[in-house]
Image: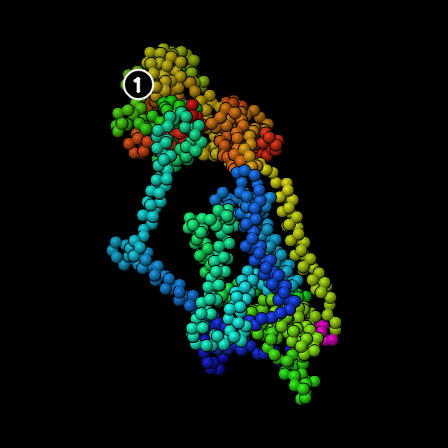
Amino acid sequence: MSKKPLQKKPEVGTTGHSWDGIEELNNPLPRWWLWLFYATIIWGLIWTILYPAWPISSQGATPGLLGYSSRQAVEADIRKFEERNAPLDQKLVAADLTTVRDDAELYSYAVKGGAAVFRTWCAQCHGSGAQGAVGFPNLLDDDWLWGGTIEDIYYTVAHGVRNEDDPDARYSEMPKWGEILEPEEIDAVVQYVLKISGQSHDAARAEAGATVFADNCAACHGDDGKGDPAQGAPNLTDAIWLYGGDEAAITESVTNSRFGVMPAWSTRLSDAQVRQAALYVHQLGGGQ
Amino acid sequence: MSEQSVTPEKLYAPREPVFPRRVHGRFRTLKWIVMAATLGVYYITPWIRWDRGPNMPDQAVLVDLANRRFFWFWIEIWPQEFYFIAGLLIMAGLGLFLFTSALGRVWCGYACPQTVWTDLFITVERWIEGDRNARVKLWNSPWTPRKIRLRLFKWTVWLLIAIATGGAWVFYFADAPTLLDHLVHFEAPRVAYATIGVLTLTTFWFGGFAREQICIYACPWPRIQAAMMDEDTITVAYRWWRGEPRGKHRKKEGAEKLGDCIDCGACVAVCPMGIDIRDGQQLACITCALCIDACDAVMEKIGKPRGLIDYMALSDEQREVNGLPPKPVWKHIFRPRTLLYTTLWAGIGVGLLVALFIRPDISVDVTPVRNPTYVTLSDGSVRNIYDVRLRNKYGEERPFHISITSDTLLRVALEGTEELTVMVKPDSTLTQRVYVTAPPQSEAARRARTDIRIWVEDLESQERAYEDTYFIGRGQ
């Protein structure tokens, strides 16, 4: 192909850089591009005057003319949501807990709010999934130390367990049987508890333990050992053990007793939040 | 480094103003039609109504961000069906590849919003300030009252177009009549005004002032397009072997030595990009073909054949220079590359259509709650919890029945109800907690893992959907 005649030479200068005959052309940028660059610099300067920026004061950065702080912004956001939720909270406080479920909007709000309350205040002991741990009840199962109806749960959350802050706190007092009973008696009653909870046990010692149980334990745990939620006495016949269900753990529980505690949340949270938490826990799978 | 001393060049250059002249012709007419069609589609689409029954919006095309729904006539897309949008975007990309490899920058020249709006703004400019020569004169004149009046009038019209452009955009995201009512009564959400404001400014600036600078400096597409064009791509070119040497045709002196190009500058005067197509293909050329129209008119006047500037392929350029006839257009367009693009494009399109027609109107997603993995109940049985999301895409409330299948005995229960059926509201999702329980000494309670399938059935339409998951036991 013949070379194109009269092809205009590019009217572009070079930067003067040349390597092995390869020159660098200087295609100038459009000037507005430069202005854009200056505009960003000016914008940046204005920004640092309006908003906290220069770390020159001993208190931190310059506060900025607009007086903005992200902490205040978050507080304003929280206030906004609190105001927006206030009617729902009032409705929840006035509502009968057993019938909240019939109001779909209120119930959905309460459960979601309860999930947030739970993650903030309850998860430290009961676990993020409410699965509990040794000494901290699992809230997903169907076994309740202090009752699993919505009112029972609400009372427990509001007043707590074995604390000084609230005179209405749940209070259970199991004696340290190690100070009262002989070691053989404790051994026998442990065998009996193993028996009634369907675990392997020594039949002869369990037989003796039945008497010890009837004389000392049945008052709270019931003649059949099924416990009494009114007194916080656990059911000893089921598969759920707060402090472990093997021989050693039961022996420890009987000898030295266990004293779980829980704060009274009504002194720290609003009644609406306590109700939210109770409704949340009630719908985790074990509510009665 | 070379040792020659070079005068330092300016690193920044001011914009050379461009004053495109009015032009008539085939391609100008085509551009008017494309402009009317694209602007029409843009402004009218949000106002088309489409009855979807109660509880549903009646806007044919609606991006409902608040409820995370996209409506397009009879099609409704939920967020988890985003692959439809992704597929459409891929098709748009492949379509662009196809058109670029076949017809060069035909998108840039005719359909790109930047081109369409710039064209519109230039039309307004010409209407107010006159054609090229008058505009050049006005540009060079001092700020007389007349110049100020014309400029203010032009900018006002531009601004009105820009507001209408930004204003139309927001109607795609809300019920258009309601939003218009709110907008004029200053009751619309702040984000609507902000969007209109930003788009108004960008339209005003891009269409009125930045114009070809956007294509040359801001748009990445011209750089990418070079990779899709080859010697068979049909682009706008100058038949230099016919036109050169260019020069004014005078009656007597050696007109026969000159080519057909009379160097009248018409092709340069009409170019919205301010380039000379006779320099050959270049980055700034958007192939709008207005120079073809301009040159054809001149060629007719001087009694020469049309097509000194024409759509042609690079390979034809070589053939014509060597005295060969050009290849037929279809031979340029039908080649392996374009056929491959077409095949891919159509394949994805057919795939999306099939997916659209077979997609169910109910669906289920199961998230096993694995914190904790299982719960021991007081009788020693083992329970797993599942969060089951039920989607009802019907415009009415539907009863969803939940059941499971597995090779062992398991019990199902739903949170908050004794039944195994829940009502799911129209066009919405319900998250239902589902309990699956294995008796104390059962196989599933002992095993670490049991496969299960959670079924959902819409009791009205008998449609069923399932998701496989597994049940975790004590692992003894």
**Residue B243 in the figure: left or right of residue A262:** right
Give the magenta-colored segment's residue range: B318-323
Name the dominant secondary structure of the magenta segment: helix
**A90 or B431, nearer to the observer:** A90
Q: Which colouring convention does the figure follow?
A: rainbow
Chain letter of the residue beneath label 1 in the structure image: A
Magenta stretch: includes residue B322: yes
Q: Is residue A253 above or below residue B72?
A: above
Q: Residue at label 1?
A: A177
Q: Position of residue B274 (x, y in %)?
A: 55, 72
Q: Is residue B129 above or below residue B448?
A: below
Dot 1 falls on a residue whose secondary structure is helix
Q: Position of residue B36 (x, y in %)?
A: 59, 59
**Residue plotted at (34% across, 61% down):** A46
| Occupied quadrant, residue B224 | bottom right
Q: Position of residue B245 (x, y in %)?
A: 65, 82
**Residue plotted at (62% across, 56% down):** B94
**B348 or A238, nearer to the observer:** B348
Q: Position of residue B257 (x, y in %)?
A: 68, 85
Identified by mark 1, the residue type is Trp
Q: Is residue A141 above or below residue A9?
A: above
Inspect this view and state whether residue A26 appears.
Answer: no
**Residue plotted at (42% across, 68% down):** A35
**Residue A264 in the figure: left or right of residue B75:** left
| Occupied quadrant, residue B452 | top right
